Image (spheres, rainbow, N blue to C red):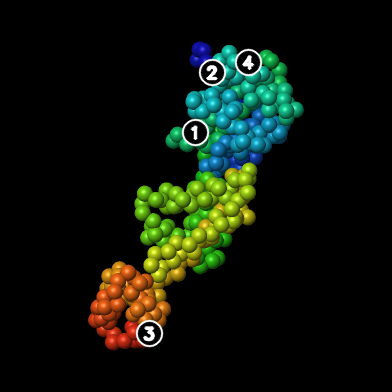
Amino acid sequence: MGKARKFLSREQALFAQLKEALGEARTLEDVYEALSQALLTLCEADHLAVGGAHPDGTAGLQWKTNTVQPLLKDYADWVQEDFVFQSTLVHPNQVLSDVQMLRGKPLSETESFRRSQGAGLKLKRVLASLLFTDQELKGGIAMYRESTRPFTLRAQWFLQQITPYITRTVARLQEFYSLRFERDLLKAIAMGSSPVLVLNSMGRRVADTGPAIPLLERWFAPHELSDGVPREWMERVMALSRFDVAVDPRLESLTLERGAERVDVTFSQSSVIWGGRKLWQVRMHERAHWLRPDWKAKLTAQELRVADCLHEGLANKEIAPRVGCSVETVKVHIKSIFEKTDTHSRAEFVARGRRS
């Protein structure tokens, strides 16, 4: 930005006031109010927007602005087409002007200009920066001017000086929001006894009750999970979250089965809004095997299948085709089962073997 600059006395006092106000901010609205009057005046801008990243990781930013809301209210739908986002994404925490972003391309040919016109705005100039910490998007700031006169280099320089403080503030607010939200959400879902996952519309885990992850690790191999969530379930939630097609109601439930063990799973949309979208609650009801765990551990897989048939009250000739062996082999398995469990009859085995 040219030769080294120093604060003028007026700017120094303003800078100190802004830092203090940002330190006391508790919401994104507080950040906007702290910045709006000072920056709009100092940088001779017509509009200001301050954005915070969606805590659930969905694309785009949630914006606070009093004047350009018609342009930014559906920002997530067209963020990838915004030349401001694309340019500042390559240069995180660096304030860029529209001249630097467009590199000779006419503003009138951009999707951003088309949408601003459609929103009843006449935006001609912009200063903007995306705010990152540890390579993670935390927020953004944008100032707009309706005249064709470019922002001055000094205005760009001043905004650059305050940007690190804005970055730290929105990062802190996002962390506070996430912790508070997760605590309240977990408090709500903990009212039930079933293990629960809370997923966003992309199938990513937002929160879970304690038993949920261990249960899934018992039922799925590590390569089938992403951050503890079955990849197939992530795809299912994304399909359920689509608005452009009719949703197959069969996607809202499924059953996992392994021998006599079973887990009933339901997918239901939560009333909680996070990042502008509703969340999904995935509730799991595990139906434990009927046989007491210590006896179950003694039996082979084939003996366990025979034991399940005994539990159903089947005769040997009915068990044989069910487990894929002869009637004589069924008798051998039953004898082994009785020996391992110190029982002497079918009735005794079933009665004593039931899980308490």
Q: Earlier in the sequence, mark 1 or mark 3?
A: 1
Q: Total label count?
A: 4
The residue at the point 36 percent across, 52 percent down is 222
The residue at the point 54 percent across, 47 percent down is 238
SS state under label 3: helix
Q: Position of residue 334 (x, y in %)?
A: 28, 79
Q: Is residue 100 above or below residue 307?
A: above
Q: Nearer the viewer, mark 1 or mark 2?
A: 1
Q: Nearer the viewer, mark 4 or mark 2?
A: 4
Q: Which residue is mark 3?
A: 351
Q: Is residue 170 above or below residue 86?
A: below
The residue at the point 50 percent across, 15 percent down is 4
- State if disc 3 and disc 2 touch (CB < 8 Å): no
- State if disc 2 and disc 4 touch (CB < 8 Å): no
- Distance between mark 1 and mark 2 Cα atoms: 25 Å
- Distance between mark 1 and mark 3 Cα atoms: 63 Å
SS state under label 1: strand
Q: Nearer the viewer, residue 274 or 76?
A: 76
- State if disc 2 and disc 1 touch (CB < 8 Å): no
Q: Give amino acid for label 3.
A: Ala
Instruction: Count neighbours of disc 2 (C-alpha within 10 A) and say few if under 14, some if 14 to 19, many if 20 or more.
Output: few
Q: Earlier in the sequence, mark 1 or mark 2?
A: 2
- Look at the image and tell me whether residue 260 can be seen: yes
Q: Which residue is mark 4?
A: 106
Q: Nearer the viewer, mark 2 or mark 3?
A: 3
Q: Quadrant of the C terminus?
A: bottom left
Q: Give amino acid for label 2.
A: Lys
Q: Which residue is mark 1?
A: 132
- State if disc 4 and disc 1 touch (CB < 8 Å): no
Residue 6 badge: 2
Instruction: Count neighbours of disc 4 (C-alpha within 10 A) and say few if under 14, some if 14 to 19, many if 20 or more.
Output: few
Q: Position of residue 125 (x, y in %)?
A: 65, 20
